[in-house]
Image (cartoon, grey):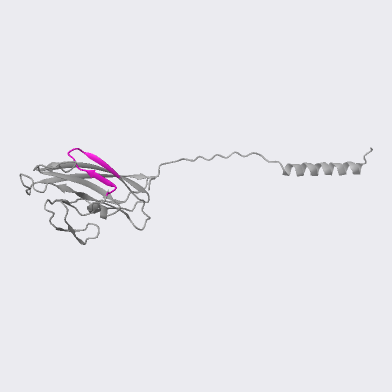
Amino acid sequence: MKLTRRSKRFITILLTAAMVIGSCFTVFASEQTTTASGSYYEPTILVTVPGTATFYLNPAKVEISANDPDTGANVTLSGQIASPAYVISSSTNCALKAKVGIKNKASGVTLVASAPASGTSKWACVSFRMDSDKAKITSGSTASVNKVLSDNEDTASYTLAKSDGSTPTKAYFGFNGTVAAEPDPAWKATDAITTTLKFTFLPTATN
């Protein structure tokens, strides 16, 4: 077919338009890099623990007036091991595993694992208790932690629940047990048990 000059010009325009349209759809690959780093997030542990605690060797089960460490109210203690319930409070935004190191020193009295069936020796069977239920510390109910004191160093563990941020989570600890009622020789003022509790708190996912 013979092309006239006008036809040639029209074909050229079409080819040019086709090239322009084709170039509008050309995509060039672009490579981007993201570097992600993971680092340990250490929660702020906010825990209040009593600096001192007291329990009484009370063979005659005398009623002892004491202050409730949690509320400040007056309470009456009457067990052979008489102890108020001491409070540990946590405002930490995760659960905490409390590890408790227990070290005892007895003077004038022997620590035993269970009450002897007979005899006149001066003994004490004392347990360290810990629970979220305050009543279980001083009653005969089974507490979450019930560790009998001995001459050897010991450990116990307890999990404090996560705080909601407005109300602290509370756990209670104290002592319970029995002692020789009428030993020979008799009880005297220098008979004592000193217990050192070392609390270590670690973040945990267990609630």
The residue lying at 24 percent from left, 44 percent from top is 147
Q: Is residue 18 left or right of residue 49?
A: right
Q: Is residue 86 above or below residue 73?
A: above
Q: Nearer the viewer, residue 87 or 81?
A: 81
Query: Which residue is found at the position 83% from the left and 43% from the top?
Result: 14
Q: Quadrant of residue 157?
A: top left
Single out the residue that lies furthest toward the front.
117
Q: Nearer the viewer, residue 128 or 161?
A: 128
- Quadrant in which the N terminus appears: top right
User: What percent of the width, then of the height, locates residue 6?
Assistant: 90, 44
Residue 152 on the magenta span = yes
**Which residue ends up furthest to the bottom in the rendered image?**
73
Give how far across and how far down residue 62 sits, in percent.
12, 56
- Furthest residue toward right: 2
The location of residue 167, given as percent across then percent down, is 34, 58
Magenta part of the chain: 142-157
Left or right of 156: which side holds 11?
A: right
Left or right of 117? Residue 134 is right
Q: Position of residue 122 (x, y in %)?
A: 10, 43
Q: 111 or 13, which lies in front?
A: 111
For the image, the number of numbered tags is 0
Which residue is located at x 84 percent, y 41 percent?
12
Q: Is residue 198 magenta?
A: no
